[in-house]
Each structure stands twice: as structure tokens, then as C-alpha cells.
Image (cartoon, helix red, strand yellow):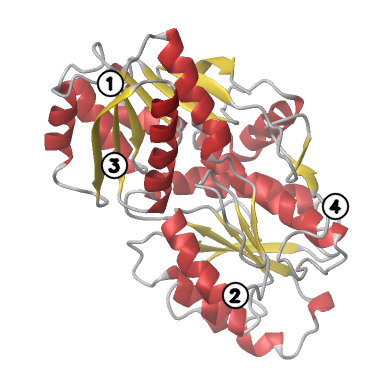
Amino acid sequence: MASAHIYLWRRGETASFPYGVSDVRQHSKAHRPYRVALLIPMCGAAGLWAPSCIASAEVALQELNATAGIAGRPVEIVVIDAALEAETPVEDVADELVSHGCIDAIVGMHISAVRQKLVATVRGRVPFVYTPLYEGGEASPGVFTIGDTPARQLGPAIGYMSAQFKLKKWALIGNDYIWPRVSHAYAKTQFHHEHRELVYEKYLPFSSKELADEVETIGKSGADAVLISLVGQDAVEFNRLFGAMGLSSKMFRLSCAIEENGLLASGARNLDRLFSSASYFAGLETAGNAEFREKYHSLHQERAPMLNALGQSTYEGLHFLARLVEQSEGHWLTREGVAPRPIEYKSARRGLYLTNAHNKSPVFLARANGFLFDDLTRLS
């Protein structure tokens, strides 16, 4: 890893970090770094997101430590595997680190099923900033969400694509957990309002061996378009199978979670008629993204992973955390479990700053073109 302020947690190493369990008792917080646990999937279906998440967080880390850090303390990051497939459940790791005072906050970029387990474990003892798109509705004390939700991200995309390409019949496929199911429930409401027909719906476990059969079934369903709510490598495998079966020329695809890493892994020949809806793409033309891209590539140079929405969200998550602590003067947890007032924080999405209250960051529909998303159409 590029920064001396980033550590990778390994099983059994809790006490071995600088200012670990034994040192916490001997040093006041003012005299030790502000340590953030960066929870990201590093294996399994979502593991392909990890390099971009770490690389983006490093940019924020560099920016924060070039100024006042967080709470006037230099910032350190502990990277922890938050995949469902991880050897040690991340909620157990988080509980150990929080209980021993080894971390001051959590920034999480992982699936909602993991977030639910963490919320039950962390119980508002440290601020928990959850950065990716998600199903909405999180209101647990000490949890702060900054990502897109279906009402902003999915609804306008379905409406635009259905009208633009005269799509009457839709198929739905996703992994079997809360985000795909809630998102698809929202999509079905949209279909009903717009008089579209649902011809297929399926939820699969991660790394399912049934994926090829389901792609074939979708191809025979008569659908004009398919909404893909598969995670990481599962979405990649879907796209490869979809292209290999010749469905790209017959059916449109929409996703809210396929990003530039997914395009690269899927292969350009398998990406015809693939669209994504999000408030961030690598090619987004904002002042904030221009600054972010310049610093990102300057820091990582030829080793830079693909820029994308999920990776960039960790950059925003660290800046949100810093402003949360600063603006609340350390009293980040109110009785209602929300930020004491709107938090304005550095962002690559809209200008240089974004607020978490009534998020008005524009949402775009973009079309896959090789390994990039371009032809951005503003939806909101």
C-alpha cells in the first residue's frame, strides 16, 4: 500500500498495531492518531471493488493529513475484509476493535447484508459512515449513509429507458439479500405505474452455479430489458454469458451497481446496450472530479485502479467523517442518531462540496463504451 498510514488487519493482530490494545490505555486520544476502520470486501463476489476503494481512500487520507487530520489528529486507516466470504466475520473484528478502543470510527463500503450485521454489533459506539448505493431506510443510531437510493437512482432510469427505447417487458435478476429485493420491489412499482410487464424475476446466492441457466431463461422470456442487481463478479459473469449467448443485440441491460471495474472484467465485446445509473462516473465533468482525478492519478500513477462510483465513495466517506467530527465538535451522536446538522463535505460528484441533507447530487444514465461509461444523460 502506498501510504505509511494504512494497515491491513490480519487475524489475531488486534494488539500489534501501533497504539494497539496495550498502548490505548497509556495514551490519551489527543496524543495518538485518529484511526478509521475501512471495511471493504477483499474476496468473494465483491472482491474486485477492493483496489479502487483503497486507492480512493488514500487520496482522502493524503488530503486530510496535509491539513488538520481529524479532530486535530493525524489519520490512520485499518483495512478490514468485509466480504461475506471472509475467513473472520467482519462484525467480530469490528466488535473487538471498538471494544478495546483501537478504532475511532468506521467507513464501510460493502453490501447491505454486512451493514446490518455491523449495526447490531457496533451499536452506535463509534460513528459508522456507510458509503455505497443502498436500498434506503437506514436510521440506526450512529450510522450515516451518503450513497444513492432507488428513488433517485433507479426510478428515473427505468422511466427514461422505457420511453427512449420503447421497452415494454422487463426481467429482474439479483443476488438474494436486501438491496436487490428492495430495489426490485421499487422497480415493480414503477413498472405498474408505467404499464410495463414483468416477465421474469430471480434471486440467486453469490457465485451461483445456476447463472448460465438463468441467463438462457432470460433470453427466452421475451423481455426487452433486464435489470441486473448482481454484485461484483456475479455481474461480470452475467455479462460474459449474456454476450456469449448473443443477447446483447436483442435486449437492453440496466444496472445501478456495475461500474468501470465491472466493464473491464466483462470484456468490451459483451457490453452492447448496457447502461448504468449513478451520481458518479469516472468521466463526470465537475470541478470536484477534475481535482480528484488529478490527485488520484498523481498518487497512484500507472498502478491506479479503475475509477468508479464505489471506489470514489470511500474518498467521500472519509471527508464526510472528518466534517462530521469537526462540525459536531465531537458530539456526533444525537438522541435521534443522526448528524446534529447538515454535513457539507468534499465530493467528486457535485462541485467540490456536497451535503448529506436533501442530497441533490445529479443522477446520470450512462452507456457502456469499451471500458468506460460515457454519453451521460442527466436524470435528476
Query: Could you tell me the amino acid type at mark 1?
Result: Asn
Residue 234 - label: 3
Cα separation between marks 3 and 2: 31 Å
**Contact check, label 1 and label 4, Cβ < 8 Å:** no
- The answer to whether one can see residue 82 in this image is no
> Mark 2 — residue?
123
Give the secondary structure at mark 3. Answer: helix
Query: Could you tell me the amino acid type at mark 3?
Result: Asp
Cα separation between marks 1 and 4: 45 Å
Residue found 53% across the figure and 52% down from its top: 109
> Mark 1 — residue?
270
Query: Could you tell me the amino acid type at mark 2?
Result: Arg
- Examine the rendered structure and indicate whether residue 271 appears above or below residue 99: above
> Mark 4 — residue?
67
Cα separation between marks 2 and 1: 43 Å
Of the image marks 3 and 4, the number of the one nearer the N terminus: 4
- Examine the rendered structure and indicate whether residue 248 appears above or below residue 108: above
Of the image marks 2 and 1, the number of the one nearer the N terminus: 2
Characterize the local packing of mark 2: few (<14), some (14-19) or many (20 or more) Cα atoms within 10 angstroms: some
**Contact check, label 1 and label 3, Cβ < 8 Å:** no
Cα separation between marks 1 and 3: 14 Å
Q: Quadrant of residue 352?
A: top right
Residue 304 - label: none
Characterize the local packing of mark 4: few (<14), some (14-19) or many (20 or more) Cα atoms within 10 angstroms: few
